[in-house]
Image (cartoon, grey):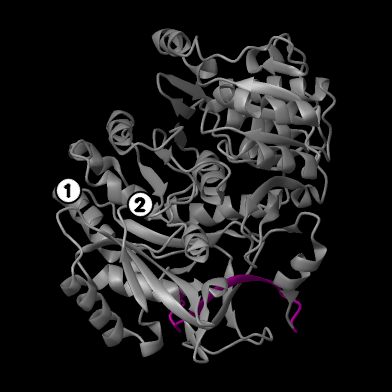
């Protein structure tokens, strides 16, 4: 039976506590049990309160996947305080702008990154709390890390409004403030996530408690409402990414599984973590799985423990899926790699599960989420017709922060009073309910009046030209006319040649309209990647414009 979403995330998690003090977090040599976790949340909530942070405020969280991040998030949520989630590697100016625009009351940063951000944080005159990976390590791990980083430890001499996390929570022994539950608590903003927005411009999506709780419910329709004690999720994706926050963290914890925290992705290290922890679930992006399956250490009888692995954030090449699935079959594991679809503004919405998968599809909607395809006037289109993908359900965002105009463009109400989110994605639905994602509308290029989709070009080449590892299609202008340029990266052991170039062109000609044929094809040794491992086509476009 579906639980009401009209709770804070903290209340939702607390209500689903199994009462058996099972481990909730694994972090190197430390396992944090349920009781200890909630005790730590209380301590941090009390510390936040003592620093004057109150319901309706927000704090900035600029941390990798360490226990501090999860504990601070739920502590803030317990008080009705929103969390401004920021990538730890953003430039200092960007960090300062994100803190200033949202008027964050406190900033939690990774201690090793404090020196580079010090001047901008001092200018903002905001209290900064430095978190160390060793804050929740034990014994030799803690001693070893502190020794290794002792010379790199930032000096706080002449630093006002700055303290370490352990000092922040020191002496916080009083019970944390308690809020009474009330109708509408699900509408309170739990997280602010910065993204490109469905319109292509940088935006800050506001996600309410209800939206992230709905994400939890939707994922549990896949893995089971309550999992067995000992099951676990590898949390490789960061919290500032909706997959990391909604799936790896909140869905995992509310299902009663354990979060295995991985602060940074390294395929060899991750393979060892999977083996040591006997992980049950994993969520990642295609590039992560492509690298992981090449590691010799990723293989053995322990893979039989794995139940589900999900892939999102970018289009999954069938070659990666087949290689992953074959590896699992080799070790007699029933686990298969399933592609999903989602976005910052709505969480995870579809998954192409193995039981009723369709090649090229991103699957059927999860839980109570609804999907439709509309034209430019928001009129619904029939099955098979291409248009903009729209979503409806408790999962959609409340809007963009301080941008009512853009919010009103992407959130609309149909004639039946149903509220929809226009995703900015182009695709189509089959009568079976399977959704097919084609491309971002903002990437669509008009050539001779015809719609050309770079993502289709990339997918066709990636699936059919075995010599190509990755590719990215961008549009550029020559003599005032738009054209496509394709950047390709070769697989190890292959070299770019006229024969490979002709093979690429023939593949595109066979599968797509002539307007999709690249004017230029350039081989590069590396393609720029975004923070989560997607090819950064914007950087390639910038490079082309400079040239």
Q: Is residue 23 left or right of residue 407?
A: left
The x, y position of residue 110, in whole percent, is 58, 26
Which mark's residue is nearer the viewer, 2 or 1?
Answer: 2
Secondary element at tag 2? helix
The residue closer to the viewer here, 134 or 454, is 454
Q: Is residue 72 left or right of residue 52?
A: left
User: How far is disc 2 from disc 1 in space, using C-alphas?
Assistant: 24 Å
Q: Earlier in the sequence, mark 2 or mark 1?
A: 2
The numbered dot on residue 209 is: none
The residue drawn where x is 36% and y is 70% is: 486
> In the rendered image, which residue does mark 1 sit on?
332
The residue drawn where x is 58% and y is 32% is: 63
The x, y position of residue 301, in whole percent, is 18, 38
393 w.r.t. 373: above or below: above
The picture quadrant where one finds residue 84 is: top right
The x, y position of residue 524, in whole percent, is 31, 58
289 w.r.t. 483: above or below: above
Secondary element at tag 1? loop
Q: How many marks?
A: 2
The residue closer to the viewer here, 203 or 471, is 471
Confirm or deny contact between disc 2 and disc 1 (CB under 8 A).
Answer: no
Q: Is residue 277 left or right of residue 126?
A: left
The residue drawn where x is 45% and y is 25% is: 27
The picture quadrant where one finds residue 345 is: bottom right
Classify 10 Å Cα crowding around label 1: few (below 14), some (14-19), many (20 and above): some
312 w.r.t. 46: above or below: below
The x, y position of residue 20, in whole percent, is 51, 27
Q: Quadrant of the N terminus?
A: bottom right
Which residues make up the magenta segment?
A: 415-437
> In the rendered image, which residue does mark 2 sit on?
287
Predominant SS of the magenta segment: strand
The residue drawn where x is 42% and y is 48% is: 283
């Amino acid at each position: 039976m579906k639980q009401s979403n009209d709770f804070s995330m903290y209340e939702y998690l607390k209500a689903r506590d199994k009462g058996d003090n099972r481990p909730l977090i694994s972090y190197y040599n430390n396992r944090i049990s349920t009781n200890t976790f909630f005790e730590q949340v209380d301590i941090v909530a009390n510390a936040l309160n003592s620093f004057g942070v109150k319901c309706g405020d927000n704090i900035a969280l600029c941390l990798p996947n360490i226990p501090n991040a999860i504990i601070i998030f739920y502590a803030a949520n317990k008080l009705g305080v929103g969390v401004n989630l920021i990538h730890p590697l953003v430039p200092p100016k960007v960090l300062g702008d994100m803190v200033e625009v949202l008027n964050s009351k406190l900033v939690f940063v990774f201690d090793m990154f404090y020196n580079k951000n010090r001047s901008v944080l001092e200018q903002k005159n905001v209290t900064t709390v430095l978190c160390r990976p060793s804050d929740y390590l034990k014994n030799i791990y803690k001693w070893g890390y502190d020794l290794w980083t002792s010379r790199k430890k930032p000096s706080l001499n002449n630093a006002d409004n700055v303290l370490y996390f352990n000092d922040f929570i020191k002496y916080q022994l009083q019970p944390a403030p308690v809020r009474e539950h009330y109708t509408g608590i699900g509408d309170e903003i739990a997280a602010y996530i910065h993204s490109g927005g469905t319109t292509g411009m940088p935006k800050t999506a506001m996600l309410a408690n209800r939206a992230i709780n709905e994400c939890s419910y939707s994922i549990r329709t896949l893995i089971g409402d309550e999992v067995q004690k000992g099951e676990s999720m590898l949390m490789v994706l960061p919290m500032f990414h909706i997959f990391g926050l909604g799936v790896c963290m909140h869905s995992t914890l509310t299902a009663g599984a354990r979060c295995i925290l991985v602060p940074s992705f390294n395929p060899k290290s991750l393979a060892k973590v999977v083996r040591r922890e006997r992980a049950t679930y994993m969520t990642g992006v295609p590039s992560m799985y492509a690298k992981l399956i090449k590691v010799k250490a990723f293989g053995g009888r322990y893979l039989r423990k794995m139940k589900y692995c999900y892939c999102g954030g970018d289009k999954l090449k069938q070659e990666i899926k087949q290689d992953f699935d074959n590896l699992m079959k080799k070790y007699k594991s029933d686990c298969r790699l399933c592609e999903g679809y989602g976005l910052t503004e709505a969480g995870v919405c579809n998954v192409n599960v193995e039981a009723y998968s369709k090649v090229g599809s991103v699957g059927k909607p999860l839980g109570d989420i609804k999907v439709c395809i509309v034209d430019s006037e928001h009129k619904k289109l029939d099955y098979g017709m291409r248009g903009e993908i729209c979503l409806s359900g408790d999962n959609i965002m409340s809007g963009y922060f301080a941008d009512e105009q853009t919010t009103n463009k992407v959130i609309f109400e149909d004639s039946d009073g149903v509220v929809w989110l226009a995703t900015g994605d182009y695709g189509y639905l089959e009568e079976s309910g399977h959704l097919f994602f084609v491309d971002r509308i903002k990437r669509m290029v008009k050539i001779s009046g015809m719609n050309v989709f770079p993502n289709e070009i990339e997918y066709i080449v990636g699936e059919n030209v075995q010599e190509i590892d990755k590719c990215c299609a961008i549009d550029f202008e020559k003599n005032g006319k738009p054209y496509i340029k394709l950047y390709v990266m070769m697989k190890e052991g292959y070299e770019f040649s006229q024969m490979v170039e002709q093979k690429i062109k023939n593949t595109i000609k066979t599968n797509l309209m002539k307007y999709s044929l690249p004017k230029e094809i350039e081989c590069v040794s590396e393609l720029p990647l975004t923070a989560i491992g997607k090819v950064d086509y914007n950087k390639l476009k910038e490079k082309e414009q400079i040239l």
